Amino acid sequence: MLVIKDLYAKVEGKDILKGINLTVNAGEVHAIMGPNGSGKSTLANVLAGHTNFEVTHGSITFNGKDIFDMSPDIRAKEGLFLSFQYPVEIPGVSMVNFLKTAVNEHRKYRNEKELTAGDFLKLMREKKAMVQIDSQLTNRSVNEGFSGGEKKKNEIFQMAMLEPTLAILDETDSGLDIDALRIVSNGVNMLKTKDNATILVTHYQRLLDYIVPDFVHVLYEGRIVKSAGKELAIEIEEKGYDWIKKELGE
Amino acid sequence: MTEVLEKIGAVPRISEIYGTNLTTIADGLPGWMNHTRYPALKAFQRMGIPGFRTENYKYTDLTRLFENENFRRSFTPDNFEVNLSEVFSCDVPEFDTHLILTVNGWYDEISNKDTQYPEGVIVKSLRNAIKENTELVEKYYGKLALSDEDPLIALNTLFAQDGIFIYIPDNLHISKPLQIINVLRSDDDLYVTQRNMLIAGKNSQAKIMLCDHTLVPQQFINNNITEVQIGEEAVIDIYSIQNQHNKTASFSGIYVHQERSSELVTNAITLHGGIIRNNLKVLLDGEQASAKICGLALSDKNQHVDNYTNIEHIKPNCQSNQLYKNILDDNSTGGFTGRIHVLPYAAKTAAFQRNNNVLLTNAAKMNTKPQLVIDNDDVKCSHGATVGRINDEALFYLQARGINEKEARLMLMFAFAHEVLAEIKIEKLRDVIDQLVNKRLRGEVSKCHSCALDCIR
Amino acid sequence: MEDQNKLIKEVTQRDYRFGFVSDIETDTIVKGLNEEVIRIISAKKDEPEFMLEFRLKAYRRWLTMKMPEWAQIKMPVIDYQEIIYYAAPTQQAKYESLNEVDPELLRTFEKLGIPLEEQKMLSGVAVDAVIDSVSVKTTFKETLAERGIIFCSFSDAVKHHPDLIQKYLGMAVPYNDNYFAALNSAVFSDGSFVYIPKGTRCPMELSTYFRINAKNTGQFERTLIIADDDSYVSYLEGCTAPMRDENQLHAAIVEIIAMDRAEVKYSTVQNWYPGDKNGKGGIFNFVTKRGICKGVSSKICWNQVETGSAITWKYPSCVLMGDNSIAEFNSVALTNNYQQADTGTKMIHIGKNTKSTIVSKGISAGHSSNSYRGLVRVAPKAENARNYSQCDSLLLGDTCGAHTFPYIEVGNSSSIIEHEATTSKIGEDQIFYCNQRGISTEDAIGMIVNGYAREVINKLPMEFAVEAQKLLQISLEGSVG
Ligand SMILES: Nc1ncnc2c1ncn2[C@@H]1O[C@H](COP(=O)(O)OP(=O)(O)O)[C@@H](O)[C@H]1O
Ligand SMILES: [Mg+2]
């Protein structure tokens, strides 16, 4: 589904990603771990097509298509979803209006009929129940005045609404209390099928208890320096990253 | 005689004063400087006396003042001897500084002759600088204070003869503040012109204190202009403490040019005066330059205090921050015009401004005119202005803790004022001013024991 | 970013939709302005003597006045002798039923989307339509009359209610108030008149549609709304003009008087022809609007969405005379291409416990210039006066300007006056967030701009709000970055 080959990217003239290779197949869950500043969010943003980041080398194919020339909204409509580490506030733009536009844009892209207001609201109710998001939140402007946890839940709610084929969750677990974490993970698990895939960016084993990864990768200084099964996450939880750094000869 | 003068109006009368004294004024000064006078005269005649018809003087009308004055001009130094202890007893902050004294706008050679300055620093009269540092002065004179922009600049340029010249060499950090005391003293009513220049070299640092002081009860009009060049990475603080009596009209103009990564702090504390108008213009003309501009004015009786600022963001990535406050009592009036102008290429500008005012009586009046002129989209700019009373909730809270209303009000007013004072980076000065403001708010206005003057009236 | 800029440009450069010229027979008088012209206008309208006197007084005063100059507006000199001061569809004043209306006129209104036809009247908005200078049709007159509400053309009001006109004309906007007010007072040809009797709630929205059609004409209409004690009315004003290369002048006056506990809501969606992409043509819109909260606890609310005109110069104002009176000003002004808008409000607090709120949202795109200019004045006797002002500017692209010039003059120590202003652009992160959810940049900008303006649009009556929202989108088309 997703094939990243020898990806280099920089921001503000600084090299951040220095040769990432990663393949994600349908039905898989990948976890990406790594110390702060190692480039995890950068990778997520590059995948979503953020223009701050300049890809200097390498390729990304998604569903067999090279995505470099796709604008961020096309990538989204192709089925790539990013749960932002820091979701932005958009004052005055109501959640309903925002999501309705997004959902219908996706539908138009797939040559499906746009949802009527009624059908849309019904869909929203269903999904809200699924991620147990507070009804009040969807009456507000996008992310405006949401607490950290509410913002993260809202991201998952949007994921439920848009049903992506590849979801990248960038530290969606940070700042969540244990109940919220369970709700978010349940949401993610419920949405999982054999046809879609998930990339979890996280610091904590905790999340991986709920969403069990097939692969764990360690991203360090812009490279994936170690890949293994879920046991790697446990090892990192126990020992931190130093031993990996040592292995690398530092 | 007076009658006739009044009839012919201030503009022709002042033009005539200039014409009559032309040779005295120009005497001993070079051609290039004297050549700035005629254009200044034309500019003054075109703009006239600042008043409410001039948009920038909408809230400070000087026509009455100028129509009615027939003050002596001090075209030659008066050579009064200044008794410094007398000055300090009148609430001029006294601590370890490099002192520079002017009397009636003239650099006071006698008092200043023994003062020591750090090596490389030049402090002298503008007249001497013109002779001895000709290139520097000629290069910068009249480049920031433009006669065409403001009638008070035109008037200053027209009559300019002397003032202070300060030069701080590259890379020199002066730790002791330079304290300039402008003394006004005369046996008759006097019109004073003073013109200063401050040049701060690359990566230099200095703190300057300006103390305006009136020693005698005569009426004064004081038109004081300072042009300031701040080199790359230099850090300059300018604090002015205005404490003059009610019959003084004081116009102070500071015009600043900032180069890359330089930092400017200004803080104008007005404790007392008759008519006060402070003009401040800052050109942020190098990337990463920053300016922090503050002012606090306490006014009562019939005083008038008007602060006018114009911050021009010319280059990208500069920052400006303005904070002005007024507390107005009795019949006093206050004005504030703060302009932030972001020019088309000044992307990534961050410019903020706040003006808060408290009115203590219904006879007091505050006019405020914050302005944003933004010609670039990639900016963060905001301004806020309030005029109001002391916060009721806070007052109640303090009272509920057992503080009587009067004391609670004072506490809140002092807290209100202190936000501006907190921006003073010279600790000793901050303490002195804190005390002065406290005293002033309690109504124990600087009634200086040894001073013949009764400042309160 | 590049793409975004391109898109901003595309979005902001779409064309004006209402630029057609209708082929309606008009009765015009010779161009130019002098006392004779004023007498002709007055005579054509069969006016009583006091009206002619009012006009002449204003004209003589106007001659002594000078066109105001504002630093933030650049404009060519207007030659007042080149303007035609009276143009009316020839069949004026005869429309008893729609069958008699010039079919071209009806088509015009259809294109404008004005519900003039009988069945559309059921939509529940009473409409007074003013073409060029003359009121051509007022709907629902009878329904309203049953409740004692007078809603008619200004000319009719002069004929049938001269006492009311004589009493209130010029009360809020004196004939000598400003240059354009004096000009309007001298030459105004028609407009709308509303009187809501004591204790009456107007059962429907009242609405006027203005259109400048004839060439070289100026439009000088005048609206007078009087809300007697305990009454309520919501009034809507919309306008369009054909595309012409020359500039055309629109200098209107609106006066509102609110008596004890009366409430008047006045909403405008201003969409005069703004000129083309290069700044050629377009309407000069110089309007004086003022309301007096005359009675205790009265309330006047100005809502405006300004997207049209080459130059807009208007400051809907309120004089808060009655104790406890309330005034609001809610404005969205969008400028694009070479448009210039200098708009804002004046809130004059005179009564005790008076309260005013100002919300101004400026949006600039293209090479346009958008200024807020406002005054809040608190008289010494206005105990406990309260004002809150929020003036925000949104810049789209790096060739436009946004300016804020508030004037705050406070002479009462118990009042609380607060003003805040911010300038921002659409965050790239906001656009990216929308993109990531599959929303194109263009739609994202439309959404964000509408979100930005939402606070004000929400104050508009439903139908108008939808219209305003669309207008914002259309006016921006071609501009987003
Ligand atoms: N917009 C930006 N401008 C400059 N530096 C950035 C930007 N975004 C990220 N970086 C830098 O890139 C590096 C990687 O950041 P990031 O991908 O956010 O790390 P993390 O792995 O913690 O998510 C950090 O050094 C960060 O400071
Ligand atoms: Mg991160």
Image (cartoon, coloured by chain):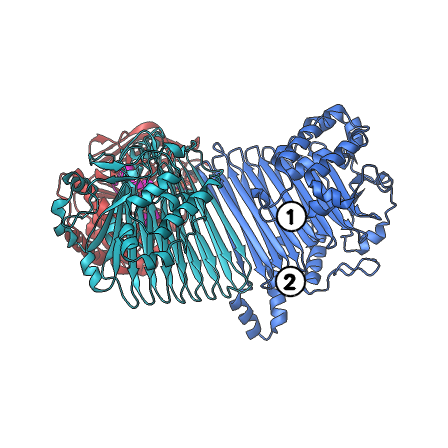
Give the mark nearer the N terminus: 2 vs 1. Answer: 1
The magenta stretch is C425-454
* Position in image of residue C72 (x %, y %): 47, 38
Q: Which chain is blue?
A: B
Quadrant assignment, res B264: top right
Q: Is mark 1 within 8 Å of ligand 1?
A: no
| Amino acid on which the number 1 mark rests in the picture | Asn
| Amino acid on which the number 2 mark rests in the picture | Asp
Front-most of B202 and C51? C51
Q: Which chain is cyan?
A: C
Label 2 or label 1, whichever lies nearer to me, is 2
Point out the image quarter for the N terminus of chain B.
Answer: top right
Q: Is residue B18 visible?
A: yes
* Residue under the point 81% across and 56% down: B89
* Position in image of residue C430 (x %, y %): 34, 43
The residue that label 2 is drawn on is B330
In this rendering, position of residue B316 left or right of residue A82: right
The residue that label 1 is drawn on is B267
State the SS at label 1: strand
